[in-house]
């Protein structure tokens, strides 16, 4: 028992970290993705409010045309609420007279009610401005009125004499807060841009990965054959992209590719018209993005592959030399076959990290030109956290993200299975 | 094809590990490079196959100078200590590798691999991978791979070091058989004098980057050039005792033995006496006490301590019933006593 507790104790930090930094975010993403939260709904509860511009959309939400006309044309009525206000503002005697003679009467226009107030038997309201204010006390329209609770809104509907069969639809239409819904996902599958983002992502991941692995291998193998000191210098230089802060690294690429940057200046000497080498065309943008991400990934590949090459026993390389293999044959037949596992591992690892990474694209092209380089993760970010229109759609963005999470988990599970994790941690593949 | 190494010098950084070494290996001969760790024997081997560049001197295979040829172009085959088989290739692919990089035709490769597999007797293992082979089988594969190119010189770097005792015996005679059958010139690097003596035609005994003595195994055993050679060869090892050379040899505390014929030196000398030359069958004169008995089956090792404190080791047929603490008076085969100066030179 004590031993088991000790084990759990040792695991605790990992469990806390996994819960805080993986499970909780995933859970919240899942929760948000099934809401319609956005800037306009807020993230706390809402109120009930129908405004003038909503009226046009109401028939589409199942509200009858008569009700809409009624809401639109609703005027003034002598009600208890209005009378109480009247008594407070303009005296109980006037209110009493209105109650006795006109209780329940409705007026389509304020002018009619004002005439009545002017013609009161005792103590009529003579001042025009006061009369207008008094008439407003009896306004019964709910358009533009805020109600804090559903009950208050329903009471108001009843007071206005709206057909009760339309109440439910109106309550739904009037609610300004967020609600639970699966609309985000149906929207995702309907929007043509979704497919575009998915294809962009696939293109980005495949191309960057290919560049990463090939260039990483090239660096690792070429530095392996260099004298140690020179090799270390080269490795340090090629490691820079990884250790530079992304903002600075991309800023340097910007300088490099701007229309008055390095490339433009140099090509300018040869008569090439100045242009923005990053944003000129989608081809330019993709090339730059793949290079930016590729160099970062390649430096990691270089380190990993270098150490894998170093793990090959030296006598094996000597043996291939006395067997007559030249450099190229040594790489092709001895080194590369033994790099199978590091290459596969890096491929899997990089797929996952590339799927979710968008910071370099955000900083470089921000998905442009147009949305030609907008990848899935960047779309999620734009939708939820940086919408150009100003309405941040947290719910829709979370739906984007949740799909990415699901793909990531499925891929990880497949990789773990494929790599036979137990075997990987058991013994080195290269013996002796 | 004979091999001539002339004034071979090798430096690692500022350290000269081998200085102007000469070595000639005759055609078809198996030569051992024997010596303790760090004596430069592996360095010599790596220089001969071209993995290490030579910092001075020349190397000839027959009449052809190969000093500056890269390893890929030298007609050598090498068997490494760990065999250095390619783990991702089958046995057949391993053996075929030297031919494959020469772009030989497929049928040619298959024929050659079959021939080599037969020579080293692993025809039934061709589809396995190195990890599925025993040490002895890996050894045979390494031999086949080294010889499939039909090299002029076969180099073996401690080929038996990683085998257990029984396999080592088997592979010892096996390597010798293959070398004899093919008539190839071979160099065996080893620190094990038994291996060197049992497998090779001649031994070059190395120490501190130079060759101390080059001779046939028996020549070197019976006629060592100096104390180091005498001490390095022989198992169980030779015993050294201090003596005062006068009319007879004075071992101290009244022990005297007759002067061997032909010994000129007088004064302080060191005697080297091999275990098989001490015992009751050689008369008397060496009085001492038995301090160590080790039965080895057919024989037993007996150490006696003389009055001077020096110890002599004898190897006797077993069953003589010697016991610890027993006092004995044995003799020595005077003709076989080796004498060395205090500096270790042979007298």
Image (cartoon, coloured by chain):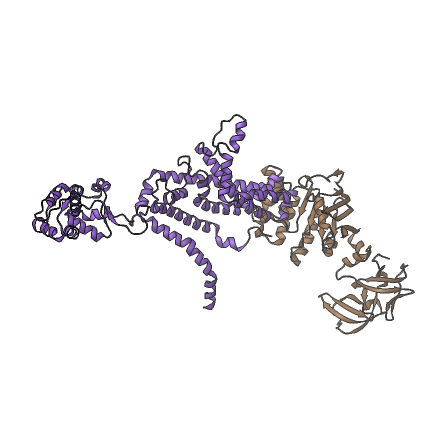
Q: Could you say which quadrant of the image residue B253 lies in?
A: bottom right
Chain (purple): A
Name the quadrant containing residue B9.
top right
Farthest top residue?
Answer: A271
- Outermost residue toward the right in this view: B247
Pinpoint residue A73: horizontal percent, then vertical percent: 16, 41
Q: Chain B drawn in what color?
A: brown
Q: Residue B93 placed where, x, y %?
A: 58, 44
Expressed as whole percent of the image width and height from the top left, the position of residue A165 reads 16, 48
Looking at the image, residue A386 sits to the left or right of residue A248; the answer is left
Please tell me which residue is depicted at 63% across the width and 53% down the height of the picture.
Answer: B136
A406 relative position to B249: left or right: left
User: Considering depth in this image, is A277 or A14 the residue closer to the camera?
Assistant: A277
Visible in this render: residue A347? yes
Is residue B184 in sight in this rendering? no
Instruction: Give the quadrant of the N terminus of chain A.
Output: bottom left
Q: Nearer the viewer, residue A52 or A244?
A: A52
Q: Pick whichever, B261 or A79, lies toward us.
A: A79
Q: In this view, does A294 lie to the left or right of B163?
A: left
Residue B64 x %, y %: 74, 38
Q: How many marks?
A: 0
């Amino acid at each position: 028992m004590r031993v088991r507790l000790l084990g759990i104790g040792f695991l605790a930090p990992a469990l806390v970290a996994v819960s805080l930094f993986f499970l909780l975010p995933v859970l919240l993403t899942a929760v948000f993705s099934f809401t319609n939260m956005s800037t306009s709904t807020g993230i706390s509860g809402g109120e009930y409010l129908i405004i003038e511009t909503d009226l046009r959309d109401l028939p589409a939400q199942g509200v009858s045309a008569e009700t809409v006309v009624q809401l639109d044309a609703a005027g003034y009525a002598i009600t208890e609420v209005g009378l109480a206000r009247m008594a407070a503002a303009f005296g109980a005697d006037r209110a009493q007279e209105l109650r006795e003679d006109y209780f329940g009467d409705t007026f389509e226009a304020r002018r009619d009610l004002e005439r009545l107030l002017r013609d009161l038997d005792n103590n009529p309201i003579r001042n025009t401005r006061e009369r207008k204010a008094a008439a407003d006390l009896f306004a019964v329209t709910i358009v533009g009125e805020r109600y804090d609770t559903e009950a208050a809104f329903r009471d108001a509907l009843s007071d206005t004499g709206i057909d009760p069969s339309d109440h439910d639809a109106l309550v739904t239409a009037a609610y300004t807060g967020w609600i639970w819904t699966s609309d985000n996902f149906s929207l995702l599958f309907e929007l043509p841009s979704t497919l575009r983002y998915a294809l962009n992502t696939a293109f980005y991941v495949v191309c960057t990965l290919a560049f990463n692995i090939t260039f990483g291998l090239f660096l690792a193998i070429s530095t392996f054959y260099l004298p140690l000191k020179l090799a270390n210098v080269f490795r340090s230089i090629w490691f820079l992209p990884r250790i530079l802060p992304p903002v600075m690294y991309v800023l340097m690429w910007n300088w490099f590719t701007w229309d008055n940057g390095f490339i433009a200046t140099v090509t300018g000497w040869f008569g090439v018209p100045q242009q923005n080498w990053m944003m000129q065309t989608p081809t330019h943008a993709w090339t730059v993005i793949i290079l930016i991400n590729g160099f970062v990934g390649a430096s990691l590949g270089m380190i990993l592959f270098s150490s894998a090459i170093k793990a090959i026993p030296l006598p094996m390389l000597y043996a291939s030399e006395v067997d007559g293999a030249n450099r190229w044959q040594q790489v092709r037949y001895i080194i590369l076959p033994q790099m199978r596992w590091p290459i596969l591992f890096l491929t899997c690892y990089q797929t996952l990290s590339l799927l979710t990474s968008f910071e370099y694209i955000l900083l470089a092209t921000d998905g442009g030109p147009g949305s030609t380089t907008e990848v899935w993760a960047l779309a999620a970010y734009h939708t939820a956290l940086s919408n150009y229109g100003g309405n941040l759609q947290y719910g829709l963005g979370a739906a984007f993200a949740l799909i990415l999470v699901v793909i990531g988990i499925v891929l990880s599970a497949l990789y773990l299975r494929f790599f036979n994790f137990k075997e990987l941690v058991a013994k080195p593949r290269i013996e002796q | 094809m004979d091999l001539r190494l002339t004034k071979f010098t090798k430096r690692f950084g500022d350290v000269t590990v081998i200085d102007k070494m000469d070595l000639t290996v005759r055609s078809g001969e198996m030569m051992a490079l024997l010596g303790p760790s760090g004596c430069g024997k592996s360095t010599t081997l790596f220089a001969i196959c071209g993995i290490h560049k030579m910092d001075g001197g020349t190397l000839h295979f027959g009449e052809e100078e190969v000093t500056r040829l890269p390893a890929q172009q030298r007609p050598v085959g090498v068997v490494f200590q760990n065999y250095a088989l390619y783990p991702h290739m089958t046995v057949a692919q391993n053996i075929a590798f030297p031919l494959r990089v020469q772009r030989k035709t497929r049928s040619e490769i298959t024929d050659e691999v079959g021939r080599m597999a037969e020579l080293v007797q692993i025809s039934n293992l061709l589809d396995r991978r190195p990890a599925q082979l025993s040490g002895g089988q890996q050894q045979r594969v390494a031999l086949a791979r080294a010889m499939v190119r039909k090299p002029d010189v076969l180099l073996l770097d401690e080929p038996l070091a990683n085998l257990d005792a029984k396999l080592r015996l088997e592979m010892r005679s096996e390597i010798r058989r293959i070398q004899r059958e093919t008539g190839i010139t071979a160099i065996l690097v080893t620190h094990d004098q038994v291996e060197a003596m049992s497998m090779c035609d001649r031994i070059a005994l190395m120490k501190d980057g130079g060759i101390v003595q080059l001779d046939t195994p028996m020549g070197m055993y019976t006629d060592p050039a100096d104390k180091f050679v005498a001490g390095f060869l022989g198992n169980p090892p030779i015993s050294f005792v201090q003596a005062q050379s006068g009319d007879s040899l004075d071992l101290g505390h009244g022990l005297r033995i007759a002067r061997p014929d032909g010994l000129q030196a007088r004064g302080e000398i060191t005697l080297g006496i091999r275990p098989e030359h001490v015992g009751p069958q050689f008369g008397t004169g060496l009085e001492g006490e038995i301090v160590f008995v080790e039965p080895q089956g057919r024989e037993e090792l007996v150490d006696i301590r003389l009055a001077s404190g020096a110890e002599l080791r004898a190897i006797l047929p077993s069953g003589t019933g010697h016991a610890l603490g027993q006092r004995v008076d044995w003799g020595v085969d005077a003709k076989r006593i080796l004498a060395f100066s205090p500096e270790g030179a042979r007298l």
